[in-house]
């Protein structure tokens, strides 16, 4: 509900709306740099999870990226068409199809990842390290079920190498 000057009275709703709008704006800003390399954010994220985790079943990629199986099928189709991933049928269960990043996919990912990290850093440049850590703690408190599934490993390695 809005009060007389139009502000949202429910602070929880206001916080949620601000969080979602901020996340979408930051994601859009950071992802814009991927289009220069012909990738969507979902394609890049798929390459990233495969680069970090190794070959995965499509359902596991979907789980890592919090996407639907149908969405991942389209993403993988496009990456496969570009020669960045390949599909491999499981020899034990032919219903299961693994996706593996190709050498070309690894090369592309390795080339564009540092710039992607830099765009992320710039997007939160107004926060100092302590504020970023505090934000992480706050988001952890409300982020039930949104545990990162290993993709932070690469960022942590990048940070420790830079520091």
Image (cartoon, rainbow, N blue to C red):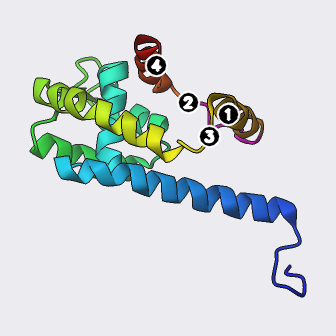
Give the secondary structure at mark 3: loop
Q: Which mark is residue 127?
A: 3
Q: Marks 3 and 4: in contact by CB < 8 Å? A: no
Q: Badge 2: how crowded within 10 Å, few (<14), some, or many (20+)?
A: few
* Residue at 44% from the left image edge and 49% from the top image edge: 68
- What separation in Å lies between label 1 and label 4 (alpha carbons)? 16 Å
Viewer-nearest of labels 1 and 3? 3
Quarter of the image that includes the N terminus? bottom right
Badge 4 is on which residue?
A: 159
C-alpha gap between disc 2 and disc 4: 17 Å
Please say whether residue 87 is visible from this viewpoint.
no
Q: Which of marks 1 and 4 is nearer the N terminus?
A: 1
N-terminal of the two: label 3 or label 2? 3
The region drawn magenta spans 142-148
Whether residue 146 appears in magenta in the rendering, the answer is yes
Q: In this view, does 151 lie to the left or right of 78?
A: right
**How far across and down, in percent of the image, does residue 88 sit?**
19, 27
**What residue is shown with label 1?**
136
Q: Marks 4/3: CA distance? A: 16 Å
Position of residue 65 measured from the top left corner of the image (x, y, whole percent): 45, 40
The secondary element bearing badge 1 is classed as: helix
Principal SS element in the magenta part?
loop
- N-term-proximal mark, 2 vs 1: 1
Q: Relative to residue 74, is residue 140 depicted above or below?
A: above
């Amino acid at each position: 509900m809005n009060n007389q000057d139009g502000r949202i009275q429910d602070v929880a709703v206001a916080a949620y709306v601000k969080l979602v709008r901020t996340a979408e704006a930051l994601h859009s800003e950071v992802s814009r740099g991927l289009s220069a390399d012909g990738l969507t954010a979902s394609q890049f994220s798929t390459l990233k999870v495969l680069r970090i985790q190794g070959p995965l079943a499509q359902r596991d990629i979907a789980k890592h990226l919090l996407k639907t199986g149908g969405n991942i099928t389209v993403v993988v189709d496009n990456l496969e068409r570009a020669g960045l991933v390949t599909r491999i049928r499981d020899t034990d269960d032919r219903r299961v199809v693994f996706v593996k990043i190709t050498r070309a996919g690894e090369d592309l990912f390795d080339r564009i990842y540092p710039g992607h990290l830099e765009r992320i850093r710039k997007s939160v440049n107004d926060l100092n390290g302590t504020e970023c850590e505090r934000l992480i703690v706050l988001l952890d408190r409300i982020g039930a079920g949104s545990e990162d599934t290993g993709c932070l490993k690469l960022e942590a390695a990048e940070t420790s190498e830079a520091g």
